[in-house]
Amino acid sequence: MTTTASIDHARLALLLTELRLPTIKSLYPAFTGRADQEGWPAARLLAALTEHEVADRARRRIERHLAEARLPPAKTLENFDFAAVPMISKAQVHALAAADSWLHEGHNLILIGPPGTGKSHLAAAIGLSLVEKGLRVLFTRTTDLVQRLQVARRDLSLEAAIDKLHKYDLLILDDIAYGGKDQAETSVLFELISARYELRSILVTANQPFGEWNRIFPDPAMTLAAVDRLVHHSTLFELNVESYRRRTALEAKRGPGRPAARATPKNTTAHPSSKKSESTEGGDM
Ligand code: ADP
Ligand code: MG
């Protein structure tokens, strides 16, 4: 065919790069070849190529959002054992992970429970599901973010730094209890919470119940105001069970043959003692 011979493929490739159409660029030789062979109408070829570009673009976008979300790997709803936290409704968690209406309204999600009970896992799994739905999420340890915001404040750009976080539909603040001790540290956290109030959602995980949040915000008025803003439009999950890590370690030691999976929740739900679990568990995720 003389018509294809007259096309400058090198230039076409350059133009497609310039137009940021990488999928069309890689597909067009095969597609145009087939179209010529099978006698497709020109519009059909154009439609096929553009459909592929759009589908790939959506995929690439989600890949980018997944990378920027910094989610801990391999924490999904599929591998979360809901039987370990009988007080948490699996259906409600799946509904939150599937729908974006609560994010549009700036509603918050608060996960409270002793260390090792699956708060970070659940937070990451919900985050992952939302990213796959096309939303933007950032998972961060609260201390890390507080440090970044303090640096920003030192550079007189705290407001800009907080505004930049508005691109995330959901900000996951993992382990807010370790947010910091002195007034300067926690006030950036407070400003962040205030700035997102009723605008953008926050998911918070905490080892301490609200009664002990005065350890996060040393100023009582600030504690009250922060808790108030977080809780106002929010869903609260309390994971008052024994540490999943500890339980699975105990079960492994005990060996097979006992229904160990049912062995612990009874007494722990009755006495959700965060003091005890804090001393037995050193840390976070
Ligand atoms: P927390 O944030 O409450 O301290 P994590 O989410 O870090 O606890 O959980 C500790 C470990 O136990 C993680 O490896 C996590 O994946 C696992 N884990 C906790 N709860 C569950 C659960 N219900 N199903 C599956 N894995 C769990
Ligand atoms: Mg954790």
Image (cartoon, rainbow, N blue to C red):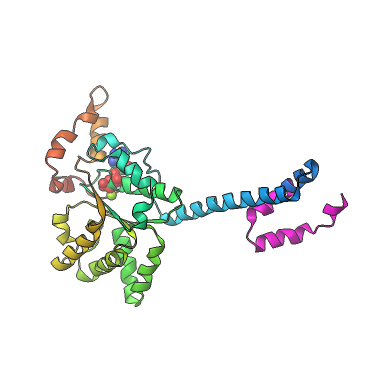
**Which residue is pictured at 24% across the width and 69% down the height?**
187
The image quadrant that residue 9 belongs to is: bottom right
Q: Is residue 42 visible?
A: yes
**Which residue is pictured at 67% across the width and 53% down the height?**
24
Q: Can you give x and y, in whole percent of width and height, for residue 184 in the image?
A: 23, 71
Q: Nearer the viewer, residue 43 or 217?
A: 43
Q: Nearer the viewer, residue 160 or 195?
A: 195
In this image, 186 relative to 91: left or right? left
Q: Going by the picture, which residue comes out furthest to the top?
A: 257
Numbered range of the magenta stretch: 1-30
Q: Going by the picture, which residue comes out furthest to the left?
A: 271
**Which residue is pictured at 41% across the width and 54% down the height?**
70
Q: Is residue 125 visible?
A: no
In the rendered structure, does residue 15 fall within the stretch colored magenta?
yes
In this image, 203 relative to 274: left or right? right
Q: Going by the picture, which residue comes out furthest to the right?
A: 2
User: From the viewer's perspective, is residue 64 above or below residue 84?
Assistant: below
Q: Going by the picture, which residue comes out furthest to the bottom?
A: 156
In the rendered structure, does residue 153 fall within the stretch colored magenta?
no
Q: Nearer the viewer, residue 31 or 146?
A: 31
In this image, 166 relative to 187: left or right? right
Q: Nearer the viewer, residue 94 or 249?
A: 94
Q: Can you give x and y, in whole percent of width and height, for residue 107 in the image?
A: 30, 56
**Which residue is pictured at 62% across the width and 52% down the height?**
53
How many discs mark residues in the rendered view?
0
The image quadrant that residue 39 belongs to is: top right
Q: Can you give x and y, in whole percent of width and height, for residue 122 in the image?
A: 32, 45
Q: Main secondary structure of the magenta part?
A: helix
Q: Can you give x and y, in whole percent of width and height, for residue 114 in the image?
A: 20, 46
